[in-house]
Amino acid sequence: MVRGGGGEILTALHKEKKKDQNVLGHNASYILPQLSAWENRLSCTIEGVEQNRLLICFANVCALQPQDKISFVLDIAAEPFKGLSET
């Protein structure tokens, strides 16, 4: 059991986490408008599902069955990008 210095370690971890969140927030503020524009243009949603993998989901692909969706995972680790699965 650690006595004494545990509070300092916890404070340092909280500061580091806050710093990481600020960096992510800054990056997201740049990329989110672009992501939204592409999603609107393509009529789809794009989500990160794992490192270097995106889930791309298209809704309303068939006027006769509007509840149907089609989606696939795109591996963007290296070019050319690879489709991994579809549903």
Image: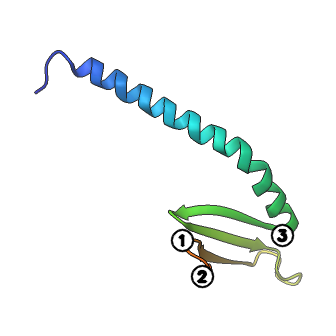
Using the numbered discs, state the Cα–Cα distance from disc 3 to disc 1 in whole angstroms: 22 Å
Which residue appears at 73% of the width and 49% of the height?
32
Which residue appears at 61% of the width and 75% of the height?
74
Relative depth, front residue between 48 and 77? 77
Q: Amino acid at mark 3?
A: Leu
Which residue appears at 82% of the width and 82% of the height?
65
| Colouring of the image | rainbow
Disc number at residue 42? 3
Using the numbered discs, state the Cα–Cα distance from disc 2 to disc 1 in whole angstroms: 9 Å
Q: Amino acid at mark 2?
A: Lys
- Relative height, residue 40 to residue 11 (above, below): below
How busy is the neighbourhood of tag 2: few (under 14 within 10 Å), some, or many (20 plus)? few
Quarter occupied by residue 86: bottom right
Q: Amino acid at mark 1?
A: Ala
Q: Secondary structure at mark 2?
A: strand
Relative depth, front residue between 87 and 33? 33
Which residue appears at 87% of the width and 65% of the height?
41
How busy is the neighbourhood of tag 3: few (under 14 within 10 Å), some, or many (20 plus)? few
Q: Secondary structure at mark 1?
A: loop
